[in-house]
């Protein structure tokens, strides 16, 4: 296992660094800046190494218990160092959302990519065809739900003398992408069969996360399993084992349960694709974890749960009037679409350690570079105090940062990871 | 005037580029990729050069008509090439929101920065002190609304043997930062007077944009003007001319009107700070422009209005069910907090030119990497068609991109600008 995920020699630029750069993950680790001693410019996004390693181990145990493989959705972090940690912790591959994300992952060493979207458009076809042309060892598959798209893929990859691997995407009525019924599925499968040299059907894919409720999630998973079995029964897959894959970050337990009938089938490969488990949060995914621990026997037996690994530190910027603190943390720094950041710790420069933030400190609004924190008269809060926030929705927090610092439990910097959005 | 703003030799990475890179703004300009011929990976963010130049010229004429100077808020774009265009078009300096933004701007040639926030925290003090220590020609001033913060600045810059320039920030009750009344103002001014070597009062600042309505905007501007006059009357400014500055992107006309009594005063320098005028939008800032053109005599006399310069191109990703198109454009690509992107053009590969998108095509929801577009049965739309979107809220669109392509009116790439978030 590589130990220096957080100490590369890549140049770091932008916000959330000590002064007197330039810095690399290696040099920032060597410096060992203390957040509590204000040795880093705030706001900053930090990852807890301990929580990351816990979450990696947790998900490895979970997927192994179900006999599933793991292709974590890399769009969450778009951080090659974290991809490498995930692969070293047993992940089968990395899931991605777009062709440019695939290129970025490939350039940083990822050699198996599952694109959980249709590959659409000539510019994107070319990005993937170029990777395949340059490296026969690069494994790539995308999903399809449209006969038109299959035909476009067929024409393009045939002209390039290449084959593109595809998975049939199953979707729920009222949901997002994916075929809704057998007629649509057959139209796509028929078109695939017209391109035997250029388009290879390697599995079935579903994203269950847009279903309305657990019953809807289970229904679309059962349809996906049945579709896999139907294709398998007619010898429709271009190769075996053939993939059956589902799971965003909220319902991966239900996906494991519903798809596990295939887990012992040597013709099948069941792949789960959660992305947010690595950093978790205290919002939408903590809610999901509570449901999982209440209902999933494997999770219950494991005892521990996922831990929030991604936090933000920011200054109290202004205390202009009663009941209000303005924090130097904005929509430029944190997700705000699934709940605002939640104050966890309060630290006054000069003190040895931070204290827990009172529960009544709550962000009520955010602007581009500021947050409005509701406080009470008499709260001991000063301009220049540090607040540490938990977050909801890691994906839209990661993409606000070109790097995140990695910290130990004493809030000292032990490295950094770059992002490739 | 430099003409090659969009043709630097900086390496471009990430989404929204042609295939077969690496690319720089210069090489991407030389290639001249056509968006309509799908020579770029979508989604992509593009800037219209013609609209940028129009908007630069428009704002120059507006501010000159009022005898004001312009320090455009650079946090909107964080794009050094655009900063340089703004400076070359007569801007007095660049406004920024944070110390790391200041460092990025300095490293790309900006030599006069107005920080429209308090400078808070040791890590941020050091970033600025290091710039000042390295370059006596670098002009920097921040705002203050807290005596505690003034004291912290005084201690730090005194210890470094430096002086920090500050502007007293005026704020509206119920608003964001800034002193609310005379007592708060005096506490800050008293603390400034305790640090004659280290803290220099160079002006008065206000951000009027958080006031509730036009009456509130005018009231806080009038308080700011009165505060400037009161300090000036007692010789309280460390140097003359002393600055009086206001204006976000929505009320800059009212700011110009209210502060113009000082425009002819040689002891005063009135500085406007709009940021979004450069790209404009079809949402919140188009609404503001309509009000401006209805009420402001200078704008009315100029005839033309600001033009939207920032657009996004994306593919139709899936047409899974009646009435719904899934677009490969998500919260990772566009602002969504002040209205969703608005379809402007529809282009089918192979056609010579795009057509206007029907008004009933409207985005109704967005996820990280997808948008849900409401369409009607029978609309002529296919997977793989291109849509061009106007946006609302340029700030939170820019920060989703490490570069934006610059295009001509035929949708050909003529260069690119990097961002430094």
Image (tube, coloured by chain):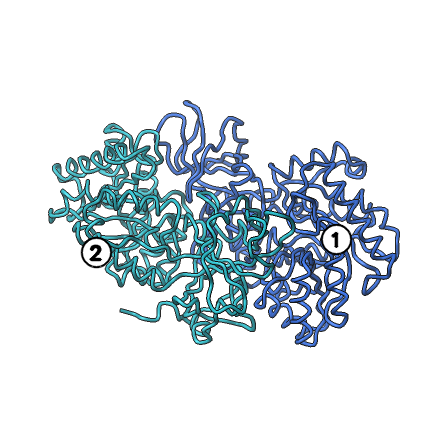
Chain colours: A cyan, B blue
The mark found on residue A115 in the picture is none
Q: Quadrant of the C terminus of chain B?
A: bottom right
Cα gap from disc 2 to disc 1, whole angstroms = 61 Å
Above or below, B394 relative to B90:
above
The quarter of the image holding the N terminus of chain B is: bottom right
Element carrying mark 1: helix
Along the horizontal axis of the image, is B257 left or right of B310?
Answer: right
Residue B161 position within the rendered picture, expressed as x and y whole percent measured from the top left: 70, 76
Eye-nearest disc, 2 or 1: 1
Q: Is residue A327 rendered to the left or right of residue A53?
A: right
Q: Residue at label 1?
A: B183
Residue that appears at 29% across and 30% down: A180
Q: Chain of mark 1?
A: B
Q: Is residue A290 visible?
A: yes
Residue A302 in the figure: left or right of residue A80: left
Is there CB contact under 8 Å for labels 2 and 1?
no
Question: Dot 2: few (<14), some (14–19), or many (≥20) neighbours within 10 Å?
Answer: some
State whether residue B54 appears in this view: no
Q: Dot 2: what SS? A: helix
Residue B216 quadrant: top right
Closest to the observer, B9 or B216: B216
- Chain to which the residue tagged by mark 2 belongs: A
- Looking at the picture, tell me which residue is in the foreground, A71 or A115: A71
For the residues tagged 2 and 1, is the chain the same?
Answer: no
Residue identifier under label 2: A61
The answer to which of B11 and A219 lies nearer the viewer is A219
Instruction: Please provide percent x and percent y for residue A37.
Output: 51, 70
Position of residue B41 measured from the top left corner of the image (x, y, whole percent): 44, 48
């Amino acid at each position: 296992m590589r130990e220096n995920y957080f100490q590369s020699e890549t140049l770091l630029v932008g916000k959330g660094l000590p002064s007197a750069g330039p810095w690399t993950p290696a040099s920032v680790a060597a410096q060992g800046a203390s957040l509590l001693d204000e040795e880093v410019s705030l706001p900053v996004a930090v990852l807890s190494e301990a929580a990351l390693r816990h979450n990696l181990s947790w998900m490895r145990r979970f997927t192994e218990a179900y006999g599933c493989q793991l292709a974590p959705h890399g769009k969450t972090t778009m951080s090659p160092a974290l991809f490498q940690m995930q692969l070293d912790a047993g992940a089968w591959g990395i899931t991605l959302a777009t062709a440019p994300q695939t290129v970025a992952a490939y350039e940083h060493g990822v050699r198996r990519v599952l694109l959980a979207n249709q590959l659409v458009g000539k510019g994107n076809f070319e990005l993937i065809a170029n990777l395949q042309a340059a490296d026969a060892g690069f494994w790539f598959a995308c999903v399809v739900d449209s006969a038109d798209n299959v035909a476009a893929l067929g024409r393009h990859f045939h002209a390039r003398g290449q084959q593109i691997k595809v998975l049939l995407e199953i979707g729920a009525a009222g949901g997002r992408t994916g075929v809704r019924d057998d007629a649509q599925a057959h139209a796509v499968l028929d078109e695939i069969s017209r391109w035997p040299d250029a388009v290879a059907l390697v599995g079935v894919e579903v994203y269950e996360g847009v279903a309305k409720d657990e019953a809807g999630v289970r229904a679309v998973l059962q349809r996906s399993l049945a579709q896999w079995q139907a294709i398998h029964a007619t010898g429709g897959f271009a190769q075996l084992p053939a993939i059956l894959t589902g799971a965003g970050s909220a319902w991966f337990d239900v996906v494991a349960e519903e798809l596990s009938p295939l887990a012992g089938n040597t013709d099948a490969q069941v792949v789960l694709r959660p992305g947010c488990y690595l950093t978790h949060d205290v919002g939408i995914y903590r809610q999901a974890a509570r449901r999982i621990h209440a209902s999933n026997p494997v999770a219950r037996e494991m005892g521990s749960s996922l831990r929030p690994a991604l936090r933000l530190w920011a200054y109290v910027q202004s205390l202009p009037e009663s009941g209000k603190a303005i924090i130097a943390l904005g929509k430029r720094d944190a997700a705000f679409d699934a709940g605002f950041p939640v104050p966890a710790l309060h630290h006054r420069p000069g003190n040895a350690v931070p204290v827990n933030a009172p529960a009544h400190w709550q962000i009520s609004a955010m602007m581009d570079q500021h947050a409005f924190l509701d406080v009470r008269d008499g709260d001991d809060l000063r301009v220049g105090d540090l607040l540490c926030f938990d977050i909801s929705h890691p994906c839209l927090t990661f993409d606000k940062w070109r790097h995140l610092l990695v910290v130990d439990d004493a809030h000292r910097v032990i490295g950094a990871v770059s992002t490739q959005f």
